[in-house]
Amino acid sequence: MRKTTTILFALLCCLTFQGCGFYSFNGISISEDIKTFQVNFFQNQAPIVEPGIDRTFTFALQDLIQNQTNLSLVPNNGELLFEGEIVQFYIAPQASTSDNTAAQNRLTIAINVRYYNNTETDGKDDFEKRFSFFSDVPATTQLIGSALDVALEEIFERITQDIVNESLAKW
C-alpha cells in the first residue's frame, strides 16, 4: 500500500509541475521565438525640460525588461521595439494650508510610448499609449538633488512597470 501511494504521489507531482512549465510569476508571457528587444532613446519634449530625465527613464525601462525577461537588449533591429517621448513634467500645488499656501506639491510625468512586436505581421499587439504617474512632496522640499531623484525613482518605477504589463504581460 505504501509503495502504491508513493508512486501515485510521484506521478501527481510530475503532472503538476509539467503543467506549470511556461508559467511566470510576473505574468510576462513572451513567445519562445522572441529573443531581442530594443528601447530607443525617449527624448524629453515636455514644455518644462528637466535635464537628464530622458536618459534616466530610457535606462530604467531597459533595466526593468532585462530584469523581468530573458530577452537580450540590442541597439537596432529588435524583435520588440519600445520608443516614445516624455511629454509632461509638471509641478503643481496639491494641498493648501489655512493661509492659502501650498502644503504639498505634486510632480507629474507623462510619457508617450509606442510598442511594436516586429515578429507579427498583423500588428495586433502594437500600441501607442500615454503613461503617467506622480509623486507628492512637502511644499517645503525643493525638487532638486536627492529629493528629485527619489521622486523620479518612484514615478519611473510605476510607469516602466505599467509599460511592461501593457506590452508583455497577457493577463
Image (cartoon, rainbow, N blue to C red):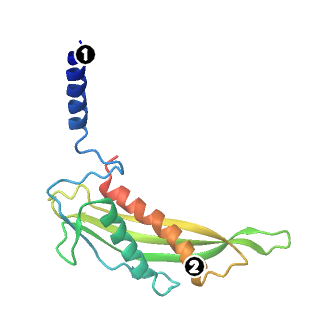
Q: Residue furthest bottom?
A: 51
- Position of 34 relative to 63 (above/below): above
Q: Is residue 70 left or right of residue 151?
A: left
Q: Amino acid at mark 2?
A: Leu
Q: Residue at x 18, y 66 (%)?
A: 79
Q: Is residue 18 left or right of residue 85?
A: left
- Quick check: can you spot residue 131? no
Give the mark, 1 or 2, whose residue is nearer the N terminus: 1
Mark 1 element type: helix
Q: Quadrant of residue 159?
A: bottom left
Q: Is residue 27 left or right of residue 150?
A: left
- Position of 170 relative to 55 (above/below): above
Nearer to us in this view, 128 or 56: 56
- Quick check: can you spot residue 114? yes
Q: Position of residue 64 (x, y in %)?
A: 36, 66
Q: Residue at x 33, y 64 (%)?
A: 67
Q: Which residue is mark 2?
A: 148
Foreground label between 1 and 2? 1
Q: Position of residue 140 (x, y in %)?
A: 73, 78
Q: Residue furthest right?
A: 99
Q: Which residue is mark 1?
A: 2
